Image (cartoon, rainbow, N blue to C red):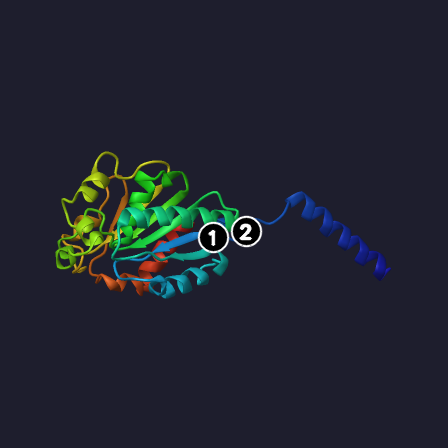
Amino acid sequence: MRRALTLLLAALAAIAAVAIGPAAPANAATDTPVVFVHGYTGSASNWTTAESVFRAGGYSSSRLFAYEYDSYGNNVTNAQGLSTFVNNVKRQTGASKVDIVNHSMGGLVSLWYIKQLGGASSVRRLASLAGANHGTTSAGACLTFTTCQQMYPGSSFINTLSAGDETPGPTVYRTWYSPCDGIIIPYTSTVLSGATNTYVACETHLGYLTDTSILTQVRGYLTA
């Protein structure tokens, strides 16, 4: 009798599972690979805290990637490198699109890729933390390097990025900017027309990289 009851319960459970269907992932958005793009003089190590925050929110390490480029070279070349990097991530993961999280000059690299190299079709969402999206006068301290010349307000590089639609294609854009930045001058340079621009009461330029509260906001934006 007990065996018959056990078999009956198992059968009912199997029928219920078929009727309900397979359980959905806890958060399907975490399947989208994330590409982190550092700022001037930065490196992949800048994203150690961010990667921890993302893993705590359900991301697998196999979905988190950090792009490194030459801070002293040319941001057109750096954007071309990002294009190759994203294509490799897509090929490796089987994903059709990636999300990009950038910081500082990484904003210029990301936007050039999206706007000038057709990257909008491969980028689902963009998060720009203190991005130098319209340049910064602090780049005047390193004008011996092409990247800093390009990062200075009014440069042909900045003018090209600012012309026309600042948030093109199907990509969804969001920025974080703060008057306490100190490096992006003016701090409103980060703001993009057509994006969700998030004002942060007081955050230092490098503080974004370790502020778990803001990084959690970024994670939430990508998984919403």
Looking at this view, name the residue that lies furthest to the right: 1
Kindly identify the amino acid type of the residue bearing the numbered disc 1: Thr
Tell me which residue sits at (26%, 64%) in the image.
207
Q: Position of residue 92 (x, y in %)?
A: 51, 51
Secondary-structure class at tag 2: loop
- The 10 Å Cα crowd at callout 1, few under 14, some 14 to 19, many 20 or more, is many
**Depth order, front residue of 19/60:** 60
Looking at this view, name the residue that lies furthest to the top: 164
Q: CA distance from mark 2 to mark 1?
A: 9 Å
Kindly identify the amino acid type of the residue bearing the numbered disc 2: Pro
The residue that mark 1 highlights is 30
Residue 224 visible in the snapshot: no
Tell me which residue sits at (16%, 45%) in the image.
155
- Find residue 25 and name its label: 2
Tell me which residue sits at (29%, 39%) in the image.
167
Secondary-structure class at tag 1: helix
Q: Mark 2 vs mark 1: which is more N-terminal?
A: 2
Q: Position of residue 206 (x, y in %)?
A: 25, 63
2 and 1 marks in contact (CB < 8 Å)? yes
**Depth order, front residue of 13/73:** 73
**Depth order, front residue of 143/130:** 143
